[in-house]
Image (cartoon, rainbow, N blue to C red):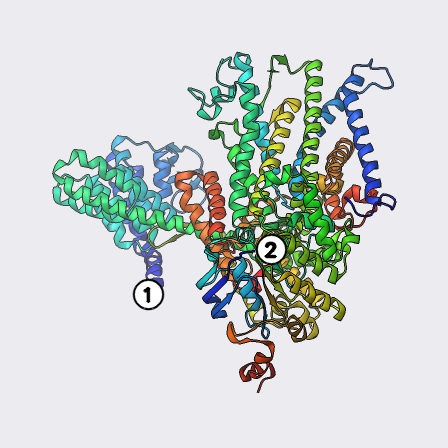
Amino acid sequence: MSGSSLYLDGVSVVFDGFRALNNLSLIIEPGELRAIIGPNGAGKTTMMDIVTGKTRPTTGVVRFGEHDLTRMDEAAIANLGIGRKFQKPTVFDALTVFENLELALKAPRDPWSCLRWVLGAQSRRRIEGVMEEIGLAERARDRAAILSHGQRQWLEIGMLLMQEPQLLLVDEPVAGMTDQETEHTAALLRRIAGQRSVVVVEHDLEFVRALGEKVTVLCEGTVLSEGSIDHVQNDPRVIEVYLGR
Amino acid sequence: MSRLLRLLPLLLLLAGPLRAQEGFETAAAGLSGGFAAQVEAVDRLGALGDPRALPILRALSEGRLQKTPEGVLVIGGQDALTGAPAATASLETVRINNRVRGALRGAFGRLELASFSVAERISAAGGLFRARSPDNIAMLEDALGRESDAAARTAMEQALAASRLAAPEAAVKRQGILLLGGTGSPEARSLLLEARAANPDLAAEIDAAVSAIDGRLQLRRAAETAFQGLSLGSVLLLAALGLAVTFGVMGIINMAHGEMVMLGAYTTVVVQGLLRGTPLAPWALPLSVPAAFLVAAAVGVALERTLIRHLYGRPLETLLMTFGVGMILQQAVRLIFGAQNQEVTSPAWMQGIVTLPGGVEVTQNRLWIILFALLVLAVTVAAIRFTRFGLEMRAVVQNRRIASTMGIRTGRVDAMTFAFGSGIAGMAGVALSQIDNVSPNLGTGYIIDSFMVVVFGGVGSLAGTMIGAFTLGLVNKMLEPWAGAVLAKIAVLVGIMLFIQRRPKGLFALKGRAAEQ
Amino acid sequence: MSATTTLAPPPRLQSALVLRGLLLAGLAILALLPLLNRLPVDSVLHVSDFIVAVTGKWICYGVLALAIDLAWGYAGILSLGHGAFFALGGYAMGMHLMRLIGPRGVYGNPVLPDFMVFLGYAELPWTWWGFSSFPFALLMALLVPGLLAGVVGYLAFRSRITGVYLSIITQAMTYALMLAFFRNDMGFGGNNGFTDFKELLGMPLNSGGTRAMLFYAALAVLGLSLLLCRHITQSKLGRVLVAVRDAESRLRFLGYNTTHVKLSVFVLSAMLAGLAGALYVPLVGIINPGEFSPGNSIEAVIWVAVGGRGTLVGALLGAFSVNALKTWLTSFAPDLWLFVLGGLFVAVTLFLPRGLVGLMSRGPGR
């Protein structure tokens, strides 16, 4: 996949005088897997909101390839190939696992096309393939409402895969997971990266270490440190922020 | 100072009869004489300005005045001067001719201008304004010198100006034009326009006076529109304030809110009924305010604890459910009290019209309702800002879990908040009972407006609710003269819809993370 | 679907079969009514004119309920203004019927309806042009509600007005229209609306044959609407609607323009409601501004809630059962009806969130 790079420059977001992001600059290359860590309120989720069009930056440049993301709405950004997984797993409870994936499948998304949509054999194979990949093949006809927390997380990751995004934003994918599920998830994300860029926001440093890729530390809405996990863990500024004085 | 001035004519009037006693009686005696003596007597009575002369002269002009052969004047079997019973035998009706009638007209004007009653003096001045005779100039100048009531003075000035305009001398006319220009009344304006054709040489002066009147009329119209807007705004504020608490602060959609207002109005009816004939009767309305608060709050608590509580977090269901509750409340009231409008009496201090400086006339009850709305707003704000209950309420709204870990019983706070919002609606009902029909569907008309006010002002902001209510009231009344009441209302609704396009969260929006939860 | 089908059909499917049987039986009974009406009066199976007239009305309500269910039950758009779309459709048809009265009116004016003569109109206002044609009137009965829903929906959905805010706005919309239609100078008959219709498509409205025809027309429209709604809800669009209802923002991040989705379904739903109104007016013979009253719209919502929103059978079941209850109750205890209706609002929201259909099927709750 050729891919575009994500480019944030001098991005600030101000809510009622509170600076959620402060002159944040960040570049994610095509195919890169990047972990973003930082204490509460560092602006990690706001950064994702900016990229996916949920929040508009007060100032700054946000580009994906040659597209100016600040001028596009959520749906248009998603259709550019930017997928997002939320902190709290959100899947469509009333629909089955299969139907959830079918909705995410890359296909025309206007109401008329949806009305006339017929599931072809190729698409069905793709959905089944992803269900295998996320380990939910057995649950195809179960409603998402009755899945366990971890299964919902995977279903959501599966939906992201169906979208065939170039850039994946993943917000705390292993929160509330067992160790085994965490390992499984790390493997899943590593497999996904390489074909596309992945940005993972995470609190769990063990998980970040397991990913074994470049790490960016955010603090008070700006980049504090960047590099390998060992590099940032030994950065005195990071230690100060995490451990206090 | 002004009070002293107001007392002055009263003192004069008390002193007057003593001095004039003798003159009055001798003058009156002339009425039983020949026509010439009658004319002289009428003129003297008019000049004396003793109000006692008025009934005698009226009786004379209407042919009810009789005399004994001895010349004692009798009206309806009583001595016209003393009021003592009089002989009924051999009475003769006093007859008059046209000369006497002419004298009587002049005397009436003079005497009525000196009447004890302000209303009578104003109506006399009105008659002289229409008569427009230069003969009345001296009399009006005289009466103006003694007059102290503002409204009566205005009427007399206007009459004097009209009389001067009718005078033959240009200088006197000019005085009249100037005076008319200063009155700012529409009658003066049409009088001036009438005079313009007859007096081409005075056209410039008349035009100036007319435009002066136009300016003042425009100003007065603007002031009246503003008052009506404030009045409508205060009604909207009252209706919306309770909703601003239950919907704005707690996020509960209570479609039975209008019925809480209705219950408040019916509480007023009941309280008035209970107190009728007791010494407390004049206080029924003020006493209804706490009563209505309690009744609506009690219904609110019952509603919240038994029903709404189970639907927290499901606003659409809450909406439908409370709509059903509203229906039941309406129907219950309809069965108990009947579907017809209930009689609500306004206390004397709320009736009548107040004239503000500049001639703006406002009804007393509207003025009270504006004050009441502001008072209720102040009480609401104070309760939320400065009381323990308000503090707990704000804590629960901001973070329910943390509040409960700090020992706040959130369920109780929910119930109290809902009761408080409902109680405010009940108090609104007391005010609305004074200006609207008290019927079971009283509340239906207010619910949509109230929601519009809260949404327009910004959910969760009491300041927004206040500014929203007054803005909508003013805009509505400003549109009414061109568009009519219904179209103005529709235009406001459409305007709000377009406004939420620009600012989906209303005038005073909460921003940031807190607002998205 | 390829996955496990070795188990017995899930309870959802079983109850769905029962419901489908119920639905077909219901439609068959409805289709028989005008025929039974033709039987001699002393026959056991004879059905009175009253019953036929009332059920004809309910059929129109059924179409309205389907429209509301499509928007609310599936897409989560709780409109409290569908009565307005219904009434607009009704007015469009009413205008056509008024034009057809021609010189048979009290004033005998061949062009102007009676109320216009009474109000001193010199000529037909432009809003009435074209309504002498039946196809045009029918088109307007669809287009006017559709257009209104399009404008209101576009403004609301674009600025992401959802949930109760949307409900209140739609309620304000129907309220404003009610005020407007009460005005005489709107040119739509003011207070009294339209009535005293004479004929439709060359058939006298007071004949039993015409009434039976209208009944079957309404029934046919109900059937077609049901098929249309079924087609939509069973397509991928139907699943998109459910997704909009349950997690709209998530769907947006999947790349769906939810504004377009909601707007399409809202407009379609409004047009269905308009069609229902257009059928209703010749059946009941009157239309007036009272149809715009906010209470009517919310009552229609409660039919759907009682029947079971999110299922098409539920919407129909609700429309028929609540209205049957209303007709029965108001005939002997009119004072009680509003208590019962209010009670239904409370009971359904508190105890029966999935309505009567939910009571019948014991499938997993939402």
User: Which residue sits at x=48%, y=27%?
Assistant: C187
* Residue B277 in sight from this viewpoint: no
Q: Which chain hosts label 1?
A: B
Q: Which of the 4 image quadrants contains residue B437?
A: top right
* Residue B219 in sight from this viewpoint: yes
Residue type at the position of mark 2: Ala
User: Which residue sits at x=39%, y=39%?
Assistant: B482
Q: Position of residue A98 (x, y in %)?
A: 73, 49
User: Which residue sits at x=77%, y=53%?
Assistant: A137
List the residue tagged with mark 2.
B425
Residue type at the position of mark 1: Met
Q: Which chain hosts label 2?
A: B
Disc ID at residue C343: none
Disc ID at residue B1: 1
Disc with the residue nearer the chain's start (2 vs 1)? 1
User: Which residue sits at x=60%, y=12%?
Assistant: C202
Q: Is residue B220 left or right of residue C326?
A: left
Q: Nearer the viewer, residue C278 or C361?
A: C361
Q: Which numbered mark, 2 or 1, is in the foreground of this view? A: 2
Note whether B131 is above or below B307 in the view shown. Answer: above
